């Protein structure tokens, strides 16, 4: 029987379509424009990659600090949508503002603001999964979110790519082209959010009480205490910390990596567009396979594949190598993100989804502080960008071992 999304599930998926346009810009055009600004300021390729990595680390660190706190407040009745709107608004405003900046240091500062808003909005968006669908549908609904997000982001990206690459023939200078590209991305993100905001209702929540903030912190403290006792959740988060670290670092630094290697900008952008296109059917195919194969096995396959990808990056030195890397990443990127999200949503208390997904985000995007900093540090110390990127293979290996242990604990938990 064909799987059909409900109206609310479709609107939840649509937000993935909107915010993925920003992700695509961050992974492609943002670092190329920053490279342009940094080059004008006389910054070397190695330092350019390092500064981009440090900026990414700062914004993910901010979300790691804010995520659990705001998540606890968001679990209060009728608060989740409000905080979600604020975070999304910061991201959209920051995205528009970026196009008007010509200083590389100001660009990095506003980039941190915009990406922090974007990442914070995903904490609450992921937590909404427990409100918009049922546990037995979560794997497939989460997969559809990433799948349609990948293919949907291609629409504004192609428009932006045409403006940026063809701006000269249209009589546009670089900054004017970038202003238009950032505005297109921000409006796509904003308008894709409206249907969810109009229809979403918080099903699971804690009562507000008289002291919302104080009560939220108290609940968060109890959640951390409970987390240590819930070994199947705790070990999964440790595993997730390591393997998703590498995934997000690849996403955040792919184009910057290729630029630092001196590869052609147009070829890099087209290769990453192929990543999005490949990811769309790959996620949907895996979502069908999951009906007959456990999520644990598919996540294991994805982690192992990323380990091989990180090792392969050590020898990357040509445009063809980068294209091969882009296709391989596209095959597994969406699936490992989608199934990790739904797997976690099924093993946590629904009424504490905001708190738990705040912690999840620490171990996810917050973890990429380590990955991007590691790549940046090793690249500068060794003078080799390839060594820096290939070091991520260690993260995937540790994550794989820990995930196997967490899956075992989860099976034992179900048998009790």
Image: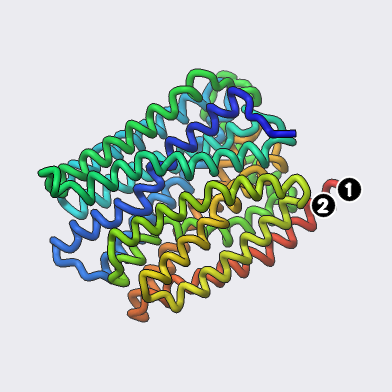
Examine the image and state in which quarter residue 288 appears: top right
Question: Which label belongs to residue 415?
Answer: 1
Question: Which label belongs to residue 107?
Answer: none
Kind of element beneath mark 1: helix
Residue 154, how many percent across, how many down? 40, 44
Kind of element beneath mark 2: helix
What residue is shown at x 40% (from left), y 70% (from top)? 320
Examine the image and state in which quarter residue 71 appears: top right
Q: How many marks?
A: 2
| Residue 85 appears anywhere in the view | yes
| 267 vs 356, nearest the viewer | 267
48 horizontally vs 354: left or right: left
Q: Residue lying at the far right in this picture: please name it.
A: 416
What residue is shown at x 41% (from left), y 34% (from top)? 87
Instruction: Judge whether 83 appears above or below 166 on screen.
Output: above
What residue is shown at x 47% (from left), y 66% (from top)? 325
Image quarter in which the N terminus is found = top right
12 horizontally vs 44: left or right: right
213 horizontally vs 285: left or right: left
Question: Which label belongs to residue 411?
Answer: 2
What residue is shown at x 23% (from left), y 51% (from top)? 165
How crowded pointer 2 is (Cα within 10 Å; few <14, some 14-19, many 20+) is rated as few
| Residue 131 appears anywhere in the view | no
Residue 201, how many percent across, how many down? 58, 20
- CA distance separating discs 1 and 2: 7 Å
| 206 vs 279, nearest the viewer | 279
* Whether label 1 touches label 2, CB < 8 Å: yes
């Amino acid at each position: 029987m064909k799987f059909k999304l409900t109206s609310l599930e479709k609107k939840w998926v649509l937000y993935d379509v909107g915010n993925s346009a920003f992700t695509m810009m961050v992974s492609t055009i943002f670092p190329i424009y920053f490279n342009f600004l940094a080059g004008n300021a006389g910054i070397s390729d190695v330092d350019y990659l390092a500064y981009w990595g440090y900026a990414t680390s700062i914004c993910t660190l901010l979300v790691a600090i804010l995520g659990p706190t705001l998540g606890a407040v968001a679990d209060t009745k009728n608060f989740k949508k409000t905080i979600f709107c604020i975070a999304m608004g910061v991201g959209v405003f920051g995205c528009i503002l970026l196009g008007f900046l010509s200083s590389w240091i100001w660009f990095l500062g506003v980039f941190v603001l915009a990406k922090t808003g974007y990442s914070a909005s995903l904490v609450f968006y992921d937590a909404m999964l427990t409100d918009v669908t049922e546990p037995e549908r979560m794997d497939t609904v989460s997969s559809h979110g990433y799948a349609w997000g990948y293919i949907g982001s291609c629409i504004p990206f192609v428009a932006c790519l045409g403006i940026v690459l063809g701006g000269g023939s249209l009589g546009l200078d670089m900054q004017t082209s970038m202003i238009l590209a950032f505005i297109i991305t921000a409006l796509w993100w904003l308008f894709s959010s409206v249907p969810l905001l109009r229809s979403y209702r918080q099903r699971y929540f804690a009562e507000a009480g008289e002291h919302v903030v104080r009560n939220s912190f108290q609940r968060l403290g109890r959640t951390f205490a409970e987390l240590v006792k819930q070994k199947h959740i705790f070990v999964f988060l440790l595993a997730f910390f390591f393997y998703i670290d590498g995934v997000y670092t690849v996403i955040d630094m792919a184009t910057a990596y290729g630029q630092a290697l001196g590869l052609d900008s147009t070829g890099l952008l087209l290769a990453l567009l192929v990543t999005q296109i490949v990811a769309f059917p790959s996620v949907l195919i895996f979502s069908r396979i999951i009906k007959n194969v456990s999520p644990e096995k598919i996540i294991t396959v994805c982690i192992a594949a990323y380990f091989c990808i990180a090792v392969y990056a050590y020898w990357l030195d040509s445009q063809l190598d980068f294209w091969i890397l882009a296709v391989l990443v596209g095959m597994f990127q969406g699936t490992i993100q989608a199934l990790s999200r739904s797997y976690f949503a099924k093993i946590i208390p629904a009424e504490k989804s905001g708190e738990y997904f705040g912690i999840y985000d620490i171990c996810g995007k917050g973890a990429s502080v380590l990955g991007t900093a590691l790549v940046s540090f090793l690249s500068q110390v060794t003078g080799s960008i390839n060594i820096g990127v290939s070091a991520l293979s260690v993260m995937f290996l540790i994550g794989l071992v820990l995930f196997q242990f967490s899956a075992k604990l989860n099976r034992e938990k179900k048998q009790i």
